[in-house]
Image: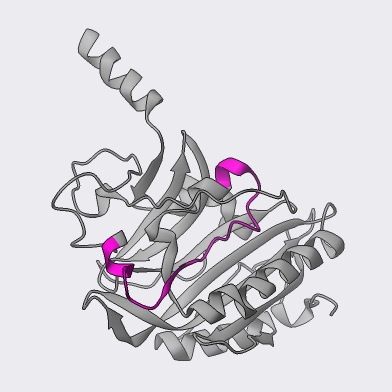
Amino acid sequence: MLLLLHVLMLSLLSGGSAKVVKDFEKECGQFFANGESPTKLSGPQYKQICQTLNNVVYYATLYDTHNKIPVYSAYKFEGIMGCTRLDKWYIEPQLDDNNASPNMQFEKEQGLGDHQALNDDYKNSGYDKGHLAPVFQANSQGCADATFTLTNAAPQNPSFNRGQWRVLEKNIAEKLSNQCLPNYSVYIVTGVVPGTNNINNRVKVPSHFWTAYCCLDNNNKCQISGGFIGENENKTPENKSEVDLEIELAKLYNVASFELFDYSTEPPTKKQKLNK
């Protein structure tokens, strides 16, 4: 009994955690519109993570352990909170060791990195650690801190990351605040498409970054939706309807279809886009 209590206390006092799960729709489905996740690519390389810090789950990530980058991160947007940046990056021990603690950790253990990117991969690579779930759209300071895990990052062209993509994240947050909140529940999913190049002969550089939003009403209908996609270079991302973005992503991922949000309650062709 004393040993059990000791283990429990260590768990409660741990700095942060990120839980690898078999079905994140059941474990952290609150970050998906109508509880349905975007398309989950098939294969053992894809791991579902409920991203948690200080025992609070903040968002969900589908992670590609072969390419060592996420496929997407899904999260709720609740307004602009003005959070500060942590500027330290966690990794996920469970991706390399099934018996490891679920705690998200800074790199201090040896033997990790077979199935995920490490901080050293980015050194002198010429690429930024590009957030998928971004700090600017985080719903609390704790959520902002939790975005600083390498399972939520991919190599991003520095000019694109600090320029056009940063502007896009800000513009989306401002428009969703004005046009969707507080009347709708706002869901966002942001992802990357693997390219052909690698950094450090390990981590795949994305060819594209993309993001999509859904403003869900009280009847669980997605009334306002849309998205953007841009090549991983300093160009303006292209504004697309949700349906057109899904079509393009299906081609880029080489799958029959790719669904961003659940539209079991409404055909996607009836949805509105954000006003420019």
132 is within the stretch colored magenta: yes
Which residues are drawn in magenta?
A: 120-143
Q: Camera-side residue: 263 or 140?
A: 140
User: If the image is split into quadrants, where does the N terminus sit?
Assistant: top left
- Give how far across and how far down residue 144 sits, in percent: 57, 49
Instruction: Mark yes or no: residue 118 visible.
Output: no
Q: Camera-side residue: 265 or 71?
A: 71
Residue at (66, 78) in percent of width and height: 227
144 to 115, vertically: above or below: above
Query: What residue occupies the far left of the structure in this picture?
Result: 111
- Give how far across and how far down residue 62 sits, in percent: 41, 63
Residue at (39, 24) in percent of width and height: 13
Residue at (32, 23) in percent of width and height: 10
User: If the image is split into quadrants, where does the C terminus sit?
Assistant: bottom right
Instruction: Mark yes or no: residue 213 visible.
Output: yes
- Please indicate whether residue 239 sits to the left or right of residue 2 in the image: right
- Give how far across and how far down residue 134 sits, in percent: 57, 60
Residue at (31, 50) in percent of width and height: 92
- Give how far across and how far down residue 123 sits, in percent: 31, 68
- Please indicate whether residue 257 sits to the left or right of residue 198 in the image: right
Q: Camera-side residue: 62 or 121?
A: 121
Tally of marks: 0
**Quarter of image, res 100:** top left
Query: What residue occupies the far top of the structure in this picture?
Result: 2
203 is within the stretch colored magenta: no
Q: According to the image, what is the colour scheme of the structure?
A: one colour
